[in-house]
Amino acid sequence: MSTYVYGITARSHPALPEGLAGVGEPPRPVRLVTAGDLVAIVSDAPEGLRPKRRDLLAHQTVLGETGAAGCVLPMRFGSVAPDDETVADVLAERADHYQERLRALDGRVEYNVKASHVEEAVLHRVMAENAEVRSLAEANRKAGGGSYEDKLRLGEMVAAAVKGKEAEDAAALERALEQVAEAVSVGPESTGWLANISFLVDREAADAFLTAVEQVRADQPQLEIRVNGPLPPYSFVDPGPAQPAGTTAGGADAGAG
């Protein structure tokens, strides 16, 4: 049977919590695969695994339970190896890399921050900051709404100004929060968000990071900001030259929603 991989940790890591269960229906018991000074946290892989809510939560729960006792390198949801032997072989092959990552991420967590514009607030800012847009809008108002061409031109100018504001606000958000983070990983663009950024934060600095988020909210009322965390540091594992633990990965990230 195939082996589902949740994460990698040091052999010195405390034992698994008793009765820990993972993905599948019924949930598969979680166990360890050992190679030298490293262990992989695994279970049997169910057939036809899909990123359903129950299994996504099970994946994250296993990482949360094991990560509470020490650093764990989290794998993405859907990481499956042919068998335990394959997992052990790749742990041995990449031991130096995984041990370096464990040292680098020890005591750190990830916060994923997404931001979008509050439409009315950003339009107010665009009008206040862009004299050309403001002038054309006033001219159209005095002309009873303006011609079709003038309305179209105003719409295009506002859209371009808002687009520029998105890039400006995303950069400002990153600058403000990177000061209280140890590393930054900019995520892929996603519909509806002007920023999708993950920050690596020392656990002891978590309150300072969240305080910085609140300060950005106060300073930038045109932004709607969503924070997800603390999470295992998915965005900072750096799997190296090949897929982690000899796996094939499917489905979605279990943590950064």
Image (cartoon, rainbow, N blue to C red):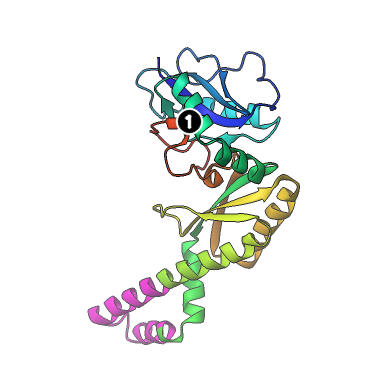
Q: Which of 90 and 107 lies nearest the eye of the viewer? A: 90
Which residue ends up furthest to the right in the rendered image? Answer: 204
Q: Residue at x 45, y 55 (%)?
A: 193
Q: Amino acid at mark 1?
A: Val
Image-based side of 81 in relation to 10, left or right: left
For the question of whether residue 230 can be seen, the reply is no
Q: Determine if the magenta segment contains residue 45.
A: no
Q: Which of 90 and 22 lies nearest the eye of the viewer? A: 90
Q: Is residue 44 above or below residue 5?
A: above
Read off the magenta span: 133-161
Q: Is residue 77 above or below residue 189?
A: above
Q: Which residue is mark 1?
A: 90
Residue 183 lies, in percent from the top left, at 60, 55
Residue 50 lies, in percent from the top left, at 38, 27
Give the class, few, some or many, for how many residues have Cα within 10 Å of label 1's Cα (few <14, many ≥20): some
Q: Determine if the magenta segment contains residue 152.
A: yes
Q: Say which quarter of the image contains residue 68.
A: top right
Residue 120 lies, in percent from the top left, at 48, 65
Magenta highlight: main SS: helix
Q: Say which quarter of the image contains residue 32.
A: top right
Q: Which of 35 and 27 lies nearest the eye of the viewer? A: 35
Q: Residue at x 37, y 73 (%)?
A: 160
